[in-house]
Image (cartoon, rainbow, N blue to C red):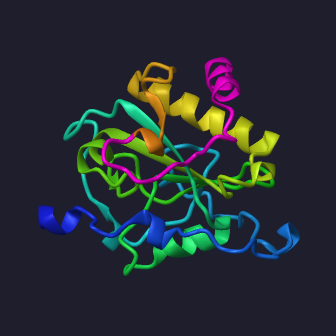
């Protein structure tokens, strides 16, 4: 893939823009299907929900690029709509993982060896694993115990795999990426609790 084409130019804010809370009851959301936990996942508890190949860059990390960051995002969309956006080849956006609010269910959308287009900064994309969390930054009810617990387990597994220190220098919010105009995960994300949970996971 042409490197210029590999660098997404569209703003995630326009793509994952906040909307009125969708009134979809959680019982109507799709459950993890039997057989959907493909051997393709890098994190065994995850369900494979592939992003479009037009929305990430194929790579061979950590051989091609060192992985030394985990970047925490909030979707500003529902879980199901986020997966649909990542699967749409026109959107030019993706993350490695998406964590559902209600139960902490994890979907993997991009292999860790590949470069997801989540940070809006090519250098940070090449060196990080991006984790999206269902919800809106101004609606803290989305940050459930289950979401924190399952996300912390995921981040701990990533840190162990790539020998990433489990601290705020290496587990960062999207707002900390140079050049970003994003504020996620926002002021309602409990960083002290989260880093503690990652360290004890």
Is 113 or 133 nearer to us in this picture? 133
Q: At which x and y percent is residue 129? A: 42, 43
Q: Residue at the location (22% across, 38% down)?
A: 65
Residue 113 position (above or below residue 35):
above
Image quadrant for the C terminus? top right
Answer whether residue 178 is magenta in the image: yes
Q: Is residue 36 left or right of residue 121?
A: right
Q: At which x and y percent is residue 104? A: 73, 48
Q: Residue at the location (40% across, 72% down)?
A: 52
Residue 196 position (above or below residue 156):
above
Residue 13 position (above or below residue 45):
below
Residue 108 position (above or below residue 188):
below
Q: Which residues are magenta?
A: 177-201
Q: In the figure, residue 154 lies in which quadrant?
A: top right
Q: Residue at the location (61% across, 50% down)?
A: 46
Q: At which x and y percent is residue 61? A: 28, 41
* Res 52 visible: yes
């Amino acid at each position: 893939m042409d490197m210029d084409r590999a660098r997404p130019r569209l703003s995630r804010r326009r793509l994952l823009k906040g909307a009125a809370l969708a009134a979809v009851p959680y019982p109507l959301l799709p459950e993890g299907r039997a057989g959907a936990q493909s051997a393709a996942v890098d994190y065994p508890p995850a369900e494979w929900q592939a992003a479009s190949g037009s929305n990430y860059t194929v790579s061979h990390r950590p051989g091609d690029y060192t992985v030394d960051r985990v970047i925490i995002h909030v979707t500003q969309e529902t879980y199901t709509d986020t997966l649909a956006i990542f699967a749409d080849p026109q959107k030019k956006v993706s993350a490695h993982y998406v964590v559902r609010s209600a139960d902490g269910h994890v979907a993997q959308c991009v292999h860790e060896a590949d470069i997801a287009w989540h940070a809006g900064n090519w250098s940070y994309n090449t060196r990080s694993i991006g984790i999206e969390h269902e919800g809106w930054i101004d609606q803290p009810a989305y940050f459930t115990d289950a979401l924190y617990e399952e996300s912390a387990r995921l981040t701990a597994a990533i840190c162990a795999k790539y020998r990433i220190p489990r601290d705020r220098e290496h587990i960062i919010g999207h707002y900390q990426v140079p050049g970003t105009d994003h504020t996620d995960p926002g002021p309602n994300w409990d960083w002290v609790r989260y880093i503690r949970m990652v360290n004890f996971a």
